[in-house]
Image (cartoon, rainbow, N blue to C red):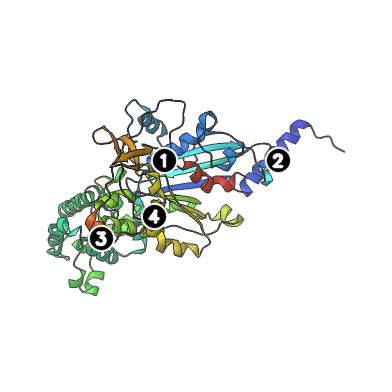
């Protein structure tokens, strides 16, 4: 019988462990998605901060691997995709931990970060190979505006133009867009394409998109690269617009229009944008995700009104159409990853009193109900939660007209004044006309809290529940 040294036995054990790691999937590709101002950057920053600081002053009570004492440590490690910008955790945490804390800069491009999470396995096959196991968490962040371009992959230029025309001719967009609409409808679609005219029209349309997002608080912004162009700034591929008068064009004439014509050039640039920008983004990033969290700010649209809230609901439906869902078995994990766990999170839960959190979750469930019903057919594991990735307020009680009522206290973002208030009742279902007429809810933006102990992780609400849902089954 050949003698096997302890060293060779250890090497064989580690090699076997590596094979087992790959087979049972000790890696999670997490997509952090959501629309603008939903708090993606703050969420990712806090999630990383909680994990890498867990052993100092942990706040992850409902994360089983922590609660059971099996969590060892987590650290940042080099990401797999060297050509993608690394998520700027250091600058984000510096903003949150300075003497007058600021929210991290919003997402302007795609970025990644990888964490290695060391723990003691309890019930999985890994416990037979080693006392410790490592789960690799790959987090991808990208602008929510780019997300809404994905449905364009299934549209022709005519279909996208018609969809956009309907949006522009309805409230609340129409009042601002009517000048642009009239200008486009007066164009001769068969006139020779003029580069300067196309650039001017695209700039005018881009200004409208900025106004829709920033002033009206709308969520459906297409094309998303127009307001966050990145490396495509001033490229002709971003210089097209929806044509708004297809009813007056003969179908054969349109189909045979050359690229030298205005309508032919618009169609060509739309197709190029779809294939070179949108499809490339989808194929490079989206197809590899296997867990997803969708962040939604439900509170700001309540301030903006019924149109803004309806736009948020439509945007969520558009987003969900673009993902590949279904249970991941062994072969799909190895060869064709699919998202098998999906969490919807209503952010900024600390901006309302704790007694309103249940209503916020109920409202979110109402927003996603049509999508949720469809996805349930795929046996997808889903959960909705109200969270605050970085808790900015303190909850308490106050006396008002002889009654005790719940309040929150925090520093207003706009003037840095300390404020104590009851923000109002969050509707538990999609608001009816009476709600919008009375408008009883006033959402206030708060600045991050100043940290009194730099050794403490960032304060949060329910990030431990998020981690348990997204990673708990991988760390048994």
Q: Residue at x 29, y 48 (%)?
A: 300
* Separation (CA) of disc 4 from disc 2: 43 Å
Mark nearer the viewer, 3 or 2: 3
**Mark 3 lies on residue:** 434
Mark 2 to mark 1: distance in Å? 36 Å
* Residue denoted by label 4: 364
N-terminal-most mark, 2 or 1: 2
Whether tag 4 and tag 2 are in contact, CB under 8 A, the answer is: no
- Please state the horizontal and vertical placement of residue 294, each as a whole percent of the image: 41, 51
Distance between the Cα atoms at labels 4 and 1?
17 Å
Determine crowd level at label 1: few under 14, some 14-19, many 20+ residues with C-alpha closer than 10 A. many
- Circles 3 and 4, Cβ within 8 Å, touching? The answer is no
- Where residue 362 appears, x then y in whole percent? 40, 55
Foreground disc of the pair 4, 2: 4
412 on left or right of 449? left
Q: Nearer the viewer, residue 54 or 333?
A: 54
Number of other residues with Cα within 10 Å of mark 4, as a class: few under 14, some 14 to 19, many 20 or more: many
């Amino acid at each position: 019988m050949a003698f096997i040294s302890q060293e060779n036995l250890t090497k064989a054990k580690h090699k076997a462990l590596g094979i087992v790691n790959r087979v049972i999937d000790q890696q999670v590709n997490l997509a952090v998605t959501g629309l603008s101002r939903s708090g993606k950057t703050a969420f990712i920053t806090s999630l990383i901060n909680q994990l890498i600081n867990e052993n100092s002053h942990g706040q992850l009570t409902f994360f089983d691997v922590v609660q059971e004492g099996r969590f060892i440590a987590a650290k940042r490690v080099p990401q797999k995709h060297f050509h993608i910008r690394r998520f700027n955790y250091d600058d984000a945490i510096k903003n949150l931990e300075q003497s007058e804390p600021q929210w991290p800069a919003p997402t302007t491009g795609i970025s990644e970060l990888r964490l290695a999470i060391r723990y003691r396995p309890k019930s999985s096959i890994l416990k037979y190979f080693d006392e410790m196991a490592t789960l690799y968490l790959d987090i991808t962040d990208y602008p929510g505006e780019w997300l809404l371009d994905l449905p364009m992959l299934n549209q022709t230029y005519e279909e996208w133009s018609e969809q956009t025309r309907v949006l522009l001719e309805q409230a609340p967009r129409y009042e601002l867009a009517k000048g642009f609409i009239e200008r486009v409808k007066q164009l001769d679609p068969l006139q020779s394409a003029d580069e300067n005219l196309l650039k001017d029209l695209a700039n005018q349309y881009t200004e409208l998109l900025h106004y829709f997002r920033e002033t009206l608080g709308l969520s459906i912004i297409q094309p998303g690269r127009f307001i966050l162009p990145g490396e495509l700034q001033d490229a002709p591929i971003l210089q097209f617009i929806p044509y708004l008068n297809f009813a007056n064009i003969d179908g054969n004439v349109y189909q045979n229009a050359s690229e030298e014509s205005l309508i032919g050039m618009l169609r060509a640039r739309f197709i190029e944008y779809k294939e070179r920008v949108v499809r490339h983004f989808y194929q490079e990033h989206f197809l590899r995700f296997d867990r997803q969290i969708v962040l939604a700010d439900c509170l700001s649209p309540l301030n903006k009104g019924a149109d803004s809230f309806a736009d948020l609901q439509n945007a969520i439906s558009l987003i969900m159409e673009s993902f590949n869902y279904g249970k991941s078995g062994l072969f799909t994990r190895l060869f064709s990853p699919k998202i098998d766990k999906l969490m919807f999170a209503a952010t900024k839960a600390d901006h309302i009193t704790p007694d309103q959190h249940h209503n916020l979750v109920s409202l979110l469930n109402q927003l996603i109900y049509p999508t949720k019903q469809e996805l349930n057919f795929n046996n997808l594991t889903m959960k909705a939660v109200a969270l605050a990735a970085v808790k900015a307020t303190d909850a308490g009680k106050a006396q008002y007209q002889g009654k005790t009522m719940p309040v929150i206290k925090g520093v207003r973002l706009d003037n840095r004044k300390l404020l104590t208030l009851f923000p109002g009742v969050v509707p538990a279902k999609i608001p009816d006309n009476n709600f919008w007429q009375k408008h009883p809810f006033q959402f206030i933006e708060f600045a991050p809290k100043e940290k009194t102990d730099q050794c403490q992780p960032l304060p949060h609400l329910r990030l431990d529940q998020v981690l348990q849902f997204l990673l708990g089954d991988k760390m048994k």
